[in-house]
Amino acid sequence: MQSQRRRDTGAEIAVRKALHRMGFRYRVDRPIVPGLRRRADLVFGPAKVAVFVDGCFWHSCPQHATSPAANADWWRDKLAGNVARDRATDRALAAAGWLAVRVWEHEDPEDAARRIADAVQARQPGKRPGKHRPTGGVGRPMRAMWNGHVIADSDRTVVVEGNHYFPLDSVDPAVLRPSSTTSVCPWKGTASYYSLEVDGQVNPDAAWFYPTPKPAAEQITGHVAFWRGVTVTT
């Protein structure tokens, strides 16, 4: 049985890189609160967000959990103990005013990074999330491409959390396909999605937008952002 690596797993590094590309900075493998003998994989101190990138085997992922047949009783107790310790850690952090964010190693790192970013922005003290001055592509031509096709092209993008939001009128409508997928951001609101179709290939839920964003995110009204392999460059 392969031993459990404590830090710098492939999944953890992928999530860290995704967050770094979005402009977030954090501490790695740090203790969190005094008296709690737990270390988080990523720590956002000002926002009091602790991120744990959990291995599917060691933390009994609902999708991929397995238990070895050899020494079955020992492994069952061991893995159940890991899960109980995780829940106890979450409760202890909540009592201390922290938020524990759990990421499974099988998750798409970009998905996980966006979820973490939403949590950090929602808890950032002393400022309203999303009201920072837009940066990046404003006044600078930006282009979104996938599968060799220009999806969007604009010098009026708005950058939020490292993502370029393109005005809807700059997006090629021929490649957009409606999707029933939605997600909720604590400060931006409810996002809807488009899939992209180019030359018969479909990239599911690769574009998202906020039909009625909350006031803190009003600058992205009528804008679309991309991920899942869509490259955005100058």
Image: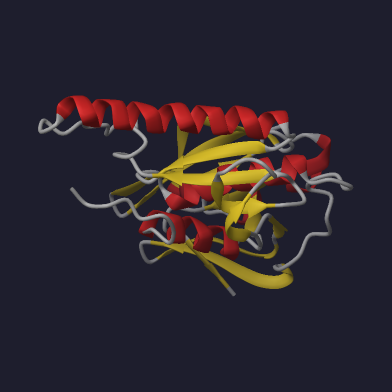
Give me the residue at 65% from left, 47% from top.
32
Q: Is residue 205 or residue 58 the one in the foreground? A: 58
* Left or right of 109 on screen, residue 188: right
Decide if residue 180 is in sight here.
no
What percent of the width, then of the height, locates residue 6? 41, 55
What percent of the width, then of the height, locates residue 140? 70, 73
Question: In the rendered image, which quarter is residue 14 located in?
Answer: bottom left
Q: Is residue 51 or residue 148 the one in the foreground? A: 51
Give me the residue at 66% from left, 41% from top.
35
* Left or right of 138 on screen, residue 57: left
**Vertical order, 14 against 214 (above or below):** below
What percent of the width, then of the height, locates residue 135? 76, 65
**Vertical order, 152 against 177 (above or below):** below
| Image label count | 0
**Vertical order, 22 against 79 (above or below):** below
What percent of the width, then of the height, locates residue 184? 62, 31
Q: Is residue 217 or residue 26 the one in the foreground? A: 26
Q: Residue furthest front?
A: 35
Give me the residue at 10% from left, 33% from top.
70
Give me the residue at 30% from left, 55% from top.
199
Decide if residue 21 is in sight here.
yes
Question: In the rendered image, which quarter is residue 188 located in?
Answer: top right
The colour scheme used to paint the residues is secondary structure
Q: Residue furthest right?
A: 126
For the C terminus, which image quadrant? bottom right
**Vertical order, 147 against 33 (above or below):** below
* Left or right of 166 on screen, residue 138: right
Question: In the rendered image, which quarter is residue 190 located in?
Answer: top right
